[in-house]
Amino acid sequence: MTASAILIQFLNGLSGASSLFLVAAGLSIVFGVTRIVNFAHGSFFMLGLYVAYSLIDRFGHGAAGFWGGVALAAVAVALLGALVEVLLLRRIYAAPELLQLLATFALVLVIQDFTLWAWGPEDLLGPRAPGLSGAVNIAGHQFPQYDLFLIVLGPTVLLALNFLLKRTRWGTLVRAATEDREMAGALGVNQKWLFTTVFALGALLAGAGGAFQIPREPASLYLDLSVIADAFVVVVVGGLGSIPGAFLAALLIAEIKAFCIGIGDVTIADSVISLPKFTLVVEFVVMAVVLVLRPWGLLGRRLTPPRRVGAVERPLALPSRRAVYALAACGAALALLPTLATGYSLILLTDIFVFALFAVSLHFIMGPGGMPSFGHAAYFGLGAYGAGLLLHRGGLPMELALLLGPLVAGVGALAFGWFCVRLSGVYFAMLTLAFAQITWSIAFQWDSMTGGSNGVIGVWPAPWLASRTSYYFLALVTSAGGITLLWRMFYSPFGYALRAGRDSPLRADAIGIDVRRQQWAAFVIAGLFAGVAGALYVFSKGSISPDSLAVPRSIDGLVMVLLGGVQTLTGPVWGAALFTWLQDAAARNVEYWRAVIGLVIIALVLAFPQGLAGFLRDRFAGERHAP
Amino acid sequence: MNVPILKVAHLSKSYGGVRAVANVSFEVVSGERLAIIGPNGAGKTTCFNMLNGQLAPDQGKVEFEGRDIAGLKPRQVWRLGVGRTFQITETFGSMTVRENVQTALLSRHRRLRSLLTLAARAYANEADALLARVGVLDLAARACAVLAYGDLKRVELAIALANRPRLLLMDEPTAGMSPRERGELMRLTSELARRESIAVLFTEHDMDVVFNHAERILVLNQGELIADGRPTEVRVDPRVREVYLGNRFADA
């Protein structure tokens, strides 16, 4: 690279950093004060872009129309943010952290379908910015004027936020609440008002981040999840709640990306390494490295854990004899079902068996382990790819591929888990997400091995298992067997040690338990069983594509566990059944099925903050639960 | 007199140039009840955490039954026979009182890796016997999270006893308890210590507890050991009086 090319890539990086910073700063402020990880933050970005498009379309492409449209779009998104806080989040601040996450994810679904309804499925490219549509000559290269504007915008917003937080009364309150929410409340800070304004500011920044992108990228329905993933990474790398950290992280990641694109393909020892392709994972690699070296991010500090008020996990009682009989009866009824039902219901039930096992494997680490994985689909996908590739490229018989495929997931969990168990809480969740994204990107890009975006196709079961009914039985037996084993582990000495490490790492260590090792082992077991679910899945569908280990699949798992109730034993199975059925029924019968699912989840979260099974347990076994 | 089970020699720890514990040496014989006292910031907690494995000393030796345990992890120290309780109780809140003790027993027998056996009946009788000894058997089926603080302290004691320790480290054992509960807990501890000849080393703020229940008292001030003796001796020690009461002649 020449010096001037390096300069240009550097400037490209700077301009890319600005919009990344705007989104991440909003997410960081909201998290700092409310301790809510807002999944819908990327949706606010997307809405900002769409609303700006429409407003500019209406106001005209002149300077007033363009800048007015951008500003109004950001304000509109801020108002929506305030509305969401008042109508939804305010009701669930006392609910478990993960349930809040579930609610914000439901918002993602609703906003996505709203956007589809309002703007249609086509990408919409906005106009150029009047007055900044040209390019300037920098060291012999044409550099867009608008990108220069963005380079200035990022630091300007940083300074403005700094002023707002350090010099105003409101900012002092925000910093106080970030430092110690309970104390700020005890000192008489009006939390309701503070939270609403903070959330509105966060939404404003996200909306502005989107609106300012209008001349650079088309409004598209995929932006919400890709932006939220980027923003999470930036916030976590910078340190949760640190605005300068977010700026630094945005800069770092944007620069690395810009140089990957600028350098292009590199040949090392006869093999071509495509650096531009690397941009798909680069931020996740950066995050993984930073989290391992500096677990609280570049400029972050260890979070003061919120004082626990009442909401402690309840003892996980052994299921009563009656409950065991009832579950066995359920299994028997399912085994008899193929004599009555045929066709589609068997396929749907097969899916439910697969996802029930997947959900229970996630529950194993989320519940007793206290490790909420945001990337559990990685192990589902590794199991599926493992089985598919062993069959196709390894030439193994299907039965053996089904058996050995999950081991691939186990090995993956062994490697990734070693890093993940060094962290806890949100940081743990983000690192699992990072590894899942890396796995996804490998599956997506390693064309020669994994078939790239098409995936592996023609992965069919052996002839004796090929009929719908026989595969139904295979799935039923495998899933029921796997779930029984996992449930048994909940009550085994291993499960006790796992719960012990979650409840009090200090005490666990003081009675001879190596907490990390215990968590690592649990992580591998969970990965292994997710792999079993994945291997079952691939042979039921006949193919596997990178989608099945992408972020949405991981989130599906979280939704299933949380819907059913993380504090119960059987909840995740009901959650998996309900969610799989709902998704299927809604997708086949309703055009805007995501919105329907989102609204159902929101209704369920508001109605049953302990999950479905938790609600039923409280309802019918009220006397067992102590205050 | 018994042989010493814990020998601490020249123990030192600094934080960024500030000496938290400086050249502290003492011994504990088996069955003995020994209190470490000192004004705030005297280095009690730092000293304590170097004994239980939470901190590695900069210098010095900690010998337990002839083995150097300085720098070992808490879980390793525990395995050798050193039990502990925390200043703010640490129990497994979502588990029942019995399960808490069972977990400790399972760990002692190295059975926590067992994946498919049921833990509910494992060592249940032994756990109940321990709970009976500390007087909380009637709470065995309750979750620790809903227990009163005084009861939790007893549960912690039962957990600590599960490994049949020869040395019990108690960090501020009576902090947060009512005066009546304090007396009861310390009487219980003393009795257990006597009956099973467990040495008890505790830090404490409450001087009534210290002078009523310790056989020997160590006094730390600014990281240094300034007195080591029987309560009657320490009570009249001029340096201790100076630290606690101030030297009013020098002050003027």
Image (spheres, rainbow, N blue to C red):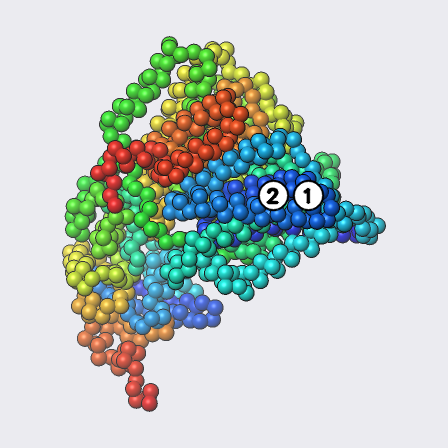
Q: Is residue A595 left or right of residue B1?
A: right
Question: Residue A175, image x and y in percent?
Answer: 49, 60
Q: Is residue A508 left or right of residue A438?
A: left
- In the depicted structure, whether residue B220 falls above or below residue B151: below
Q: Give the crowd class for mark 1: few <14, some 14-19, many >=20 residues within 10 Å.
A: some
Residue behind mark 1: A59
- In the depicted structure, whether residue B85 falls above or below residue A410: below
Residue behind mark 2: A48
Q: CA distance from mark 2 to mark 1?
A: 16 Å
Question: Residue A182, image x and y in percent?
Answer: 39, 57
Q: Is residue A73 visible?
A: yes
Q: Residue at x 42, y 23 (%)?
A: A353
Give the SS element for disc 2: helix
Do marks 2 and 1 share a chain? Answer: yes
Which mark sits nearer the N-terminus, 2 or 1?
2
Instruction: Please name whichever residue, A254 or A96, is drawn nearer the observer in this view of the structure.
Output: A96
* Residue type, numbered disc 2: Gly
Give the SS element for disc 1: helix
